[in-house]
Protein backbone atom coordinates (compact mmCIF):
# COMPACT_ATOMS: atom_id res chain seq x y z
CA UNK A 1 0.00 0.00 0.00
CA UNK A 2 3.00 2.30 -0.11
CA UNK A 3 1.96 3.40 -3.61
CA UNK A 4 -1.31 4.83 -2.23
CA UNK A 5 -1.22 8.38 -0.99
CA UNK A 6 -3.55 10.07 1.44
CA UNK A 7 -4.92 9.47 4.86
CA UNK A 8 -6.84 6.47 6.17
CA UNK A 9 -10.17 7.69 4.78
CA UNK A 10 -8.79 8.26 1.26
CA UNK A 11 -7.00 4.92 1.19
CA UNK A 12 -10.05 3.03 2.42
CA UNK A 13 -12.27 4.71 -0.19
CA UNK A 14 -9.85 3.66 -2.95
CA UNK A 15 -9.76 0.07 -1.72
CA UNK A 16 -13.55 -0.13 -1.46
CA UNK A 17 -14.04 1.51 -4.88
CA UNK A 18 -11.56 -0.93 -6.45
CA UNK A 19 -13.39 -3.85 -4.79
CA UNK A 20 -10.21 -4.87 -3.02
CA UNK A 21 -11.90 -4.56 0.37
CA UNK A 22 -15.45 -4.79 1.70
CA UNK A 23 -16.89 -1.51 2.94
CA UNK A 24 -16.20 -1.22 6.69
CA UNK A 25 -19.00 -0.20 9.03
CA UNK A 26 -17.19 2.95 10.14
CA UNK A 27 -16.64 4.36 6.63
CA UNK A 28 -19.97 6.23 6.32
CA UNK A 29 -19.61 7.78 9.78
CA UNK A 30 -16.07 8.83 8.99
CA UNK A 31 -17.15 10.40 5.67
CA UNK A 32 -19.80 12.45 7.49
CA UNK A 33 -17.35 13.63 10.15
CA UNK A 34 -13.82 13.30 8.72
CA UNK A 35 -10.84 13.59 11.05
CA UNK A 36 -8.94 16.83 11.29
CA UNK A 37 -6.10 17.24 8.83
CA UNK A 38 -2.90 18.86 9.95
CA UNK A 39 -0.60 20.84 7.69
CA UNK A 40 2.47 18.97 6.57
CA UNK A 41 5.91 20.25 7.31
CA UNK A 42 8.71 20.20 4.78
CA UNK A 43 10.86 18.21 7.17
CA UNK A 44 11.82 21.43 8.93
CA UNK A 45 10.67 21.75 12.50
CA UNK A 46 10.98 25.26 13.81
CA UNK A 47 12.65 25.68 17.17
CA UNK A 48 10.41 27.12 19.86
CA UNK A 49 11.76 30.36 21.29
CA UNK A 50 10.37 31.81 24.49
CA UNK A 51 10.80 35.50 25.33
CA UNK A 52 12.98 34.74 28.37
CA UNK A 53 15.39 32.43 26.52
CA UNK A 54 18.19 35.02 26.04
CA UNK A 55 18.12 35.73 29.77
CA UNK A 56 18.20 32.01 30.59
CA UNK A 57 21.41 31.76 28.54
CA UNK A 58 22.87 34.75 30.39
CA UNK A 59 21.89 33.13 33.71
CA UNK A 60 23.85 29.99 32.81
CA UNK A 61 26.84 32.13 31.81
CA UNK A 62 26.78 33.91 35.16
CA UNK A 63 26.05 30.78 37.20
CA UNK A 64 27.95 27.88 35.64
CA UNK A 65 27.14 25.64 38.63
CA UNK A 66 23.50 25.68 37.45
CA UNK A 67 24.24 24.57 33.90
CA UNK A 68 23.17 20.98 34.62
CA UNK A 69 19.70 22.12 35.66
CA UNK A 70 17.07 21.58 33.06
CA UNK A 71 15.88 24.95 31.74
CA UNK A 72 12.41 23.49 31.19
CA UNK A 73 11.23 20.97 33.78
CA UNK A 74 8.16 19.34 32.37
CA UNK A 75 7.53 17.15 35.40
CA UNK A 76 8.01 19.86 38.03
CA UNK A 77 5.63 22.44 39.46
CA UNK A 78 8.30 24.92 40.46
CA UNK A 79 10.12 26.45 37.52
CA UNK A 80 13.90 26.08 37.57
CA UNK A 81 15.98 29.06 38.75
CA UNK A 82 17.12 29.95 35.22
CA UNK A 83 13.54 30.29 34.02
CA UNK A 84 12.58 32.30 37.14
CA UNK A 85 15.54 34.60 36.47
CA UNK A 86 14.46 35.16 32.85
CA UNK A 87 10.86 35.84 33.81
CA UNK A 88 11.95 38.22 36.57
CA UNK A 89 14.14 40.19 34.14
CA UNK A 90 11.19 40.54 31.76
CA UNK A 91 8.94 41.62 34.61
CA UNK A 92 11.42 44.27 35.76
CA UNK A 93 11.85 45.54 32.21
CA UNK A 94 8.07 45.92 31.90
CA UNK A 95 8.18 48.09 35.03
CA UNK A 96 10.62 50.43 33.29
CA UNK A 97 14.10 49.25 34.29
CA UNK A 98 16.83 49.04 31.70
CA UNK A 99 17.87 45.56 30.57
CA UNK A 100 21.24 45.61 32.30
CA UNK A 101 19.78 46.94 35.58
CA UNK A 102 16.99 44.36 35.46
CA UNK A 103 19.53 41.56 34.97
CA UNK A 104 21.66 42.80 37.87
CA UNK A 105 18.65 43.06 40.18
CA UNK A 106 17.31 39.62 39.23
CA UNK A 107 20.76 38.08 39.71
CA UNK A 108 21.10 39.75 43.10
CA UNK A 109 17.68 38.38 44.13
CA UNK A 110 18.72 34.89 42.99
CA UNK A 111 21.98 35.03 44.95
CA UNK A 112 20.20 36.23 48.11
CA UNK A 113 17.60 33.47 47.82
CA UNK A 114 20.26 30.80 47.23
CA UNK A 115 22.30 31.96 50.22
CA UNK A 116 19.18 31.99 52.41
CA UNK A 117 18.40 28.40 51.41
CA UNK A 118 21.97 27.32 52.18
CA UNK A 119 21.87 29.03 55.59
CA UNK A 120 18.51 27.43 56.40
CA UNK A 121 19.86 23.98 55.60
CA UNK A 122 22.99 24.57 57.68
CA UNK A 123 20.76 25.58 60.58
CA UNK A 124 18.63 22.44 60.10
CA UNK A 125 21.77 20.30 60.26
CA UNK A 126 22.92 22.05 63.47
CA UNK A 127 19.55 21.50 65.12
CA UNK A 128 19.51 17.82 64.13
CA UNK A 129 23.05 17.29 65.45
CA UNK A 130 22.20 19.08 68.72
CA UNK A 131 19.22 16.75 69.17
CA UNK A 132 21.40 13.74 68.37
CA UNK A 133 19.46 12.93 65.22
CA UNK A 134 20.64 12.25 61.75
CA UNK A 135 20.69 15.42 59.60
CA UNK A 136 17.87 15.66 57.07
CA UNK A 137 18.63 15.25 53.37
CA UNK A 138 19.54 18.45 51.61
CA UNK A 139 16.36 19.94 50.13
CA UNK A 140 18.52 21.91 47.70
CA UNK A 141 21.09 19.41 46.44
CA UNK A 142 23.37 20.13 43.56
CA UNK A 143 22.01 19.07 40.20
CA UNK A 144 24.86 16.64 39.66
CA UNK A 145 23.98 14.87 42.91
CA UNK A 146 20.32 14.69 41.83
CA UNK A 147 21.36 13.07 38.55
CA UNK A 148 23.63 10.64 40.37
CA UNK A 149 20.83 9.74 42.80
CA UNK A 150 18.53 8.92 39.86
CA UNK A 151 21.24 6.80 38.22
CA UNK A 152 22.27 5.03 41.44
CA UNK A 153 19.58 2.35 41.19
CA UNK A 154 20.72 1.44 37.67
CA UNK A 155 24.37 1.32 38.72
CA UNK A 156 23.54 -0.93 41.67
CA UNK A 157 21.25 -3.11 39.57
CA UNK A 158 24.20 -4.43 37.61
CA UNK A 159 25.49 -6.09 40.80
CA UNK A 160 22.24 -7.62 42.01
CA UNK A 161 20.08 -8.22 38.92
CA UNK A 162 19.97 -11.99 38.22
CA UNK A 163 19.95 -11.48 34.45
CA UNK A 164 23.08 -9.37 34.63
CA UNK A 165 24.70 -11.92 36.94
CA UNK A 166 23.95 -14.70 34.43
CA UNK A 167 25.52 -12.73 31.59
CA UNK A 168 28.55 -11.96 33.77
CA UNK A 169 28.99 -15.62 34.74
CA UNK A 170 28.68 -16.71 31.11
CA UNK A 171 31.32 -14.17 30.07
CA UNK A 172 33.62 -15.40 32.84
CA UNK A 173 33.16 -19.01 31.69
CA UNK A 174 33.87 -18.05 28.06
CA UNK A 175 36.99 -16.16 29.11
CA UNK A 176 38.20 -19.10 31.21
CA UNK A 177 37.55 -21.48 28.30
CA UNK A 178 39.52 -19.24 25.94
CA UNK A 179 42.41 -19.02 28.39
CA UNK A 180 42.47 -22.79 28.85
CA UNK A 181 42.27 -23.35 25.10
CA UNK A 182 45.15 -20.92 24.56
CA UNK A 183 47.31 -22.62 27.18
CA UNK A 184 46.71 -26.10 25.76
CA UNK A 185 47.43 -24.93 22.23
CA UNK A 186 50.74 -23.45 23.34
CA UNK A 187 51.89 -26.58 25.22
CA UNK A 188 51.23 -29.14 22.50
Image (tube, rainbow, N blue to C red):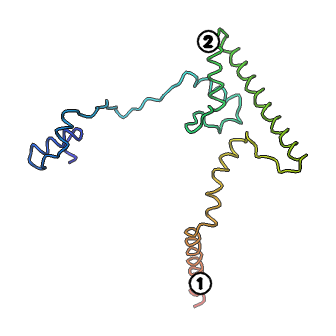
Residue at 58% across, 70% down: 162
Numbered disc 1: secondary structure: helix
Q: Residue furthest bottom?
A: 188
* Occupied quadrant, residue 107: top right
Residue at 58% across, 87% down: 184
Numbered disc 2: secondary structure: helix
Does residue 2 lie above or below 30 as drawn?
below
Residue 96 horizontal side relative to residue 27, left or right: right
Residue at 29% across, 32% down: 36
The answer to which of marks 1 and 2 sits earlier in the sequence is 2
Does residue 40 lie above or below 156 as drawn?
above
Residue 114 horizontal side relative to residue 186, left or right: right
Residue at 60% across, 85% down: 183
Residue 19 horizontal side relative to residue 164, left or right: left
Q: Residues within 10 Å of mark 1 (few under 14, many from 20)?
A: few
Does residue 74 lie above or below 21 as drawn?
above
* Occupied quadrant, residue 160: bottom right
Where residue 69 appears, as percent x and y from the top left, is 64, 37
* Occupied quadrant, residue 118: top right
Where residue 32 appears, as percent x and y from the top left, is 19, 33
Where residue 179 appears, as percent x and y from the top left, is 60, 80
Q: Residue furthest right?
A: 130
Which residue is label 1 attached to?
180
Mark 1 near mark 2, Cβ–Cβ under 8 Å?
Answer: no
- The residue mark sitting in front, 1 or 2, is 2
Where residue 98 appears, as percent x and y from the top left, is 67, 11
The quarter of the image holding the C terminus is bottom right
Q: Residues within 10 Å of mark 2 (few under 14, many from 20)?
A: few
Which residue is label 2 attached to?
94
> In whole angstroms, how far apart are the C-alphas of marks 1 and 2?
77 Å
Does residue 89 lie above or below 141 as drawn?
above
Amino acid sequence: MSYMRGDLLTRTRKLVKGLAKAEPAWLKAMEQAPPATFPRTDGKVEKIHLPEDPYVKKFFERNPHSIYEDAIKICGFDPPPARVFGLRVLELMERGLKEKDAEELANMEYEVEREAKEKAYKRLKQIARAQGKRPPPNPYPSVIKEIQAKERKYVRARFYDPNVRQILNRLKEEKAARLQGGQRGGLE
